[in-house]
Image (cartoon, grey):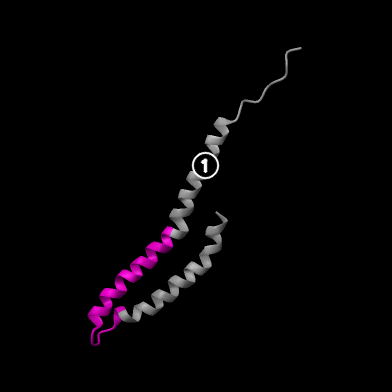
Amino acid sequence: MAGAVERVLPKMMTLTAVIAGLLPILWSHGTDSELMQRIAVPMIGGMVSSTLLTLIVIPAVYGLVQGWGLERTRQQLPAPVGRAAE
């Protein structure tokens, strides 16, 4: 889980830089702008979806799998032996 926290700043900086570079392409009206807009829109969608996947989905799935592993380990351990009757 600590890895997701460490990736927040680099991922957000990358997302901001890419979107800031692609927004002028989306708003342009010059020659070949239609072609470039068709390229820019999926790139922005991919960056947003990869950010959500990296920062939300993958850590959540990891937490679920880690929890299942702990439950399985807990079930396999022998029960603690109590004191012998006196």
x, y percentage for residue 54?
Answer: 45, 59
- In the rendered image of this protein, does residue 6 appear above or below residue 57? below
- Magenta: main secondary structure equals helix
x and y percent of residue 78 in the render?
61, 27
Instruction: Locate the N terminus by quadrant.
Output: bottom right
Measuring 27% from the left and 79% from the top, which residue is drawn there?
A: 36
Q: In which image quadrant can residue 31 be found?
A: bottom left
Q: Quadrant of residue 77?
A: top right
Residue at point 28%, 83% (across, down): 28
Q: Of all residues shown, which one is farthest toward the right?
A: 86
Residue hosting label 1? 67
Q: Is residue 50 magenta?
A: yes
Q: Dot 1 lies on which element?
A: helix
Point 30% across, 80% down: residue: 27
Please report the residue visible at 73 percent of the width from the left and 13 percent of the height from the top: 85
Residue closer to the observer: 2 or 76: 76
Provide residue 8's location: percent of width, then percent of height. 51, 64
Outermost residue to the top: 86
Q: Which residues are magenta?
A: 26-53
User: Is 15 situated above or below 27?
Assistant: above
- Residue 66 inside the magenta-drawn segment: no
